[in-house]
Amino acid sequence: MTQKSDQTGDVLCQRVAELRKSHKLTLDQLASSSGVSRSMLSQIERGQANPTLAVTFRIAQAFGITIGELVDQPWTSPSIEVVHGDDANNLFRSDDRCTIRTLSPLHLERSVEFYELELAAGESLPSSAHFEGTRELLTVAKGQAEIESGETRRVLQENDTASYRADLNHRITNTGTERLVAYLVVTSR
């Protein structure tokens, strides 16, 4: 076992401890989900071990993130990230009935998702319940929409915004006569 000696090691030990606590995991639970021993995890968190790439990969996988996100140092990241409107990789869905374009950087999509949504007149976008605590905010830029969340329904006009539970079955319906253009933000705990 080698002593850590660089800033990446410092960031790693802090991030593992921070992520474990924010996910409300014990060392034993993280060990079980990552396949890394409890003692190794403890040593990493205390800065007493410099894990191999394979160990780092298993820890990142347990949190559902990449190695880069695990060891990301905010001071080395660009202060401005751009999601280009003409980037086809950002199209989640695109057909005559519905277009959904991702507006948030893809690496943020674990805690917040931001989309531009277009629905043809009369079309709906049904969604099954997401994880507990998930909420959506929908702002209508053009047209008219009806939001359903569980048994509750609300009609939105242009420039209206609704916040609703997305941990229930929910639906966005274009109830107007023109194409609906809206902005959707999905947040989770």
Image: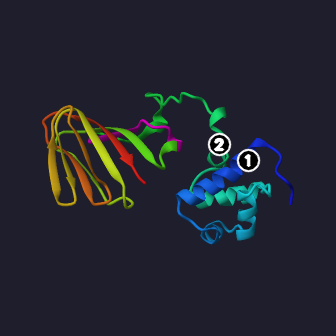
Disc nearest the viewer among 2 and 1: 1
Q: Position of residue 61 (x, y in %)?
A: 62, 58
Q: Give left or right: position of 76 versus 136.
A: right
Q: Secondary structure at mark 2?
A: loop
Q: Position of residue 116 (x, y in %)?
A: 34, 36
Q: Earlier in the sequence, mark 2 or mark 1?
A: 1
Q: Give left or right: position of 83 versus 65.
A: left
Q: How many C-alpha atoms fall within 10 Å of the one at disc 1: few (<14), some, or many (≥20)? A: some
* Residue, disc 2: 72
Q: Give the alpha-carbon distance from disc 2 to disc 1, as whole Å.
A: 11 Å
* Residue, disc 1: 10
Q: Secondary structure at mark 1?
A: helix
Q: Is residue 13 magenta?
A: no
Give the extent of the magenta segment. Answer: 97-107
The three-letter code of the residue at mark 1 reads: Asp
Q: Are marks 2 and 1 in contact (CB under 8 Å)?
A: no
- Residue drawn at the location 62% of the way across and 66% of the way down: 30
- Residue drawn at the location 43% of the way across and 45% of the way down: 112
Image quadrant occupied by the N terminus: bottom right
- Residue drawn at the location 13% of the way across and 38% of the way down: 176
Q: Nearer the viewer, residue 41 or 114?
A: 41
Q: Position of residue 33 (x, y in %)?
A: 61, 68
Outermost residue, front direction?
Answer: 46
4 w.r.t. 140: above or below: below
153 w.r.t. 76: above or below: below
Give residue 181's quadrant in the image: top left
Mark number, residue 119: none
Q: Nearer the viewer, residue 42 or 154?
A: 42
The three-letter code of the residue at mark 2 reads: Asp
- Residue drawn at the location 77% of the way across and 57% of the way down: 51
